[in-house]
Image (cartoon, rainbow, N blue to C red):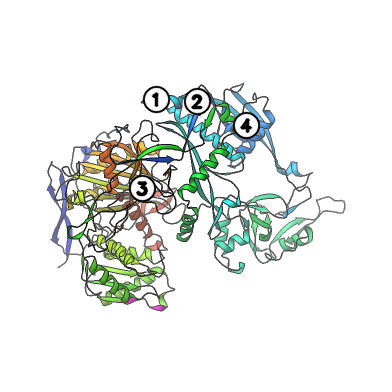
Amino acid sequence: MEVAITRVSFVAKGGMTEEVPGIVEAAEPPTSSQSPADVPHNLETEQMTPTKYSIISRNGVGTTGKHIPLLVNLFEVAVNVPDTVFFQYSVAITFEDKQAVESKGIGRKVIDRLYQTYSSELGGKRFVYDGGKTLYTVGPLPLNKYEFKVLLEKSFTKRSSAKSPGANGSLHEETKRSKHSFQSKTFMVEISFATKIPLQSIVISLKEVESDTNSQDALRVLDTILRQRAANCGCLLVRQSFFHDDSRNFNDVGAGVTAVSGFHSSFRSTQRGLSLNIDVSTTIIIKPGPVIDFLLSNQQVKEPRYIDWEKAKKMLKNLRVQATHHNQEFKISGLSEKPCIQQLFSMKVKNDDNNSRGQTVDITVYEYFAKHCGIELTSSAYLPCLDVGKPKRPVYLPLELCSLVSLQRYTKVLSLMQRASLVEKSRQKPQDRIKILKSAVGKCYDDDPVLAACGISIEKQLNLIEGRVLETPKLKVGKNDDCIPHNGRWNFNKKTLLQASHIDYWAVVNFSASCDTSYISRELIRCGMSKGINIERPYTLIEEEPQLRKSHPVARVERMFDLLASKLNREPKLILCVLPERKICDIYGPWKKKCLSEIGVVTQCIAPVKITNQYLTNVLLKINSKLGGINSLLAIEHSGHLPLIKDTPTMILGMDVSHNSLGRLDSPSIAAVVGSRHWPLISRYRASVRMQASKVEMIDALYKPLENGSDDGIIRELLLDFYDSSNGRKPTQFIVFRDGVSESQFEQVLTIELNQIIKAYQHLGEVNVPQFTVIVAQKKHHIKLFLPNGPENVPPGTVVDTTITHPRNYDFYMCAHAGMLGTSRPVHYHVLLDEIGFSADGLQNLIHSLSYVNQRSTIATSVVAPICYAHHAAAQMGQLLNFDDSSETGSSPASEGGIPIPELPRLHRNVRSSMFFC
């Protein structure tokens, strides 16, 4: 008998019309891509005024835990001339014919030359220039508006003639005589007064309850001073970080990519006052040096003849090179169509009277350099040339005469191997980092004239503060045993899982030529028995046919499923998939898509290097979670005594947006939300994932009304699942954890995302608005905590909610995990809203506890489990599109710049409620 899931209406307590699954006979089998069932469109709730929320202020500080002294990488700042006033001016730079200047790097050169030329007209005032359209001065300029003509002339160290072959008879020539005609440009610069920014506003904002917008402007000016100082030293600037061109700071991370270490520096307002935050920072650059060497390394080939030139063309476009036969930089626009020895260009031959209006001849680039430059090309004669000219006027340079300029950012997505190398080479022990930071603050800012004019002085020692270490939460495992983590870690040695699954019908498929699947399955069964999981022998073990190993990944997966279908007589409970390579390989995406979207079967992928008991235990933790088991629970959760949650149906949401998940800079972003289920538990979750426009941070599919009046949004899915799994209870309060948003986006979280959640909630028939506690977790910041007298990291459970936190807003830092390598980074939590009414201790202990409920882990995670799960869900669903399968991938009507945004495959109904992301 074929059956299908339909929806029947139930009324939950409180009058909420709800839908839960029911089973009825069906004439036709359902498809896995069925849209959510239609419900009457509630026009009344659609027309309701959006609820307005405001960011709350701190309502107290925590007191529980052991108090410990800490150092923080904040340096106290004294403002000795508090009545200083910055004057802000708007800057407009154009060419002489009033055309806009598009080059990003020209602004600082123009303003530097302007200051050198017109300093007296400007009253000798020093500028603080942001590189764009704004500059600042300490005190006013003599006039409110200026217009200057600036001549920018590029000089060369070589005075002898140096030429490069160009198309249409042109020769690029730099000589003393021709320099002016070829390299000088005239710019028009308009400077006009915009506003005043008093430095005193920072001091006032520290004392007043309400925020002073001028204080943020004043902090921006101070940060601009730091950036300008770094720019004047020739540093690469990346937001508030700067990087010197010093090979001692370079670390090769493979494939022609180099990690360069530098410093982040920014001024911050804290409860103690104004501070300077300095931290070690790392960015990725193209490895400087010969272009040929870079291409060989980037494509990981041994000889130039193996280079993929189409790939090289995309990689090199817009990079800057230094021509070694003369001192000039060029920007690469492409590659020549033919090799250097065959590529022709037209050159005008001078007459006997030295008149250039002579005959035009065609000459190869190779011949030109041999005859006219005296350079015999040895390694690049049969390779393409670099084109450094304009689209209709190419200029060719042989590859062997070009070197990539240093400090050019690498903006493409790093491979897994590169990321691993980057992490390994950028680690620093806590005490080593302290020494570097102390040295940096002493050298960098002592002699800055603008800071001196403001009367700003910076302390040379790290701030000493007080923190607290929260009590480690107790866990419950199988046989009602207690498990007490030590130093943020625990294990299942001699322990069993709390609720273990029974795996009675399963299969193993092997894409690897080097793994013994019989041995793996036997060891998995043995290890499972010790953990309480009853695993029968696998029904079948299928090896991939050797001749298929070089086929397209999709074809390999399809063939494997054909073999599975021929061996199995019913749907397996689990398929264990042995991948040919470690981490995510090209099989992973199509395999997951087939299992999760099309077939609807739980799968676990492995790529073991060494079969150990710990490895098998970690695999079993994931499998048990995916099959609906529970590995461990918080003891307080197991007993049903969670404060403020046990008596009121509470749904916990973890929300994250993943960018560039498909490995391309223009790829759509993936929004993932996980919601808790089986209330009053807080350890079990379901995920819902959608694609959205590239680089968009606000999630736009939380509520998604369709033309027929139904809602196809994320929250509806999670609400229905909560109702189904929580004995027909609807959530009346939400705890929302949001990852990845900056301070400037906090208001949008409350106004856009929260109101979407409310609309989805009301669309299901509920008129009342639930209560919310909204917390943003930030991992990408530069605050580090240190022990004053010890080489190790701060202990897990360390929390700081005084001294270094925001003067008014409700925020705190928590280091829930044990940092074993490098220097721990605490998570910066911001409480935007708390209608539920947690105490400071209650909320901090809840967040700390949620770092111990990740079912795939036996260590405390650095951030709460709901955010970890959302991140994993987005990454895994992104892999479903991360292969060449465009013919099978639909597109949604939404588009970005005319490019359709691909639609993520929907999960099959058999697995959509599972923790597939574990």
The crowd level at tag 2 (other Cα within 10 Å; few <14, some 14-19, many 20+) is many
Quadrant showing the C terminus: bottom left
Q: Amino acid at mark 1?
A: Lys
Residue 541 is situated, as x and y percent measured from the top left of the image, at: 30, 76
Where is mark 4, residue-wise?
Answer: 189
Q: Is residue 205 left or right of residue 67?
A: right
Where is mark 3, residue-wise?
Answer: 795
Instruction: Quote the CA–CA distance across marks 4 and 3.
Output: 55 Å
Image position of 306 with respect to 146: above or below: below
> Does residue 221 appear in the picture of this structure?
yes
Q: Nearer the viewer, mark 4 or mark 3?
A: 3
Image position of 885 with respect to 847: above or below: below
Q: Amino acid at mark 4?
A: Val
Where is mark 1, residue-wise?
Answer: 207
Residue 812 is situated, as x and y percent measured from the top left of the image, at: 35, 39
Furthest toward the front, the residue is: 789
- CB of mark 2 within 8 Å of CB of mark 4? no
Instruction: Quote the CA–CA distance across marks 3 and 1.
Output: 33 Å
The crowd level at tag 1 (other Cα within 10 Å; few <14, some 14-19, many 20+) is few
- CB of mark 4 within 8 Å of CB of mark 3? no
Where is mark 2, residue-wise?
Answer: 197
Q: Between disc 4 and disc 3, whose residue precedes?
A: 4
Q: Between disc 2 and disc 4, whose residue precedes?
A: 4
Which residues, given as a range, are shown in magenta?
Answer: 542-546
Residue 712 is situated, as x and y percent measured from the top left of the image, at: 27, 49
- CB of mark 3 within 8 Å of CB of mark 2? no
Q: Between disc 3 and disc 2, whose residue precedes?
A: 2
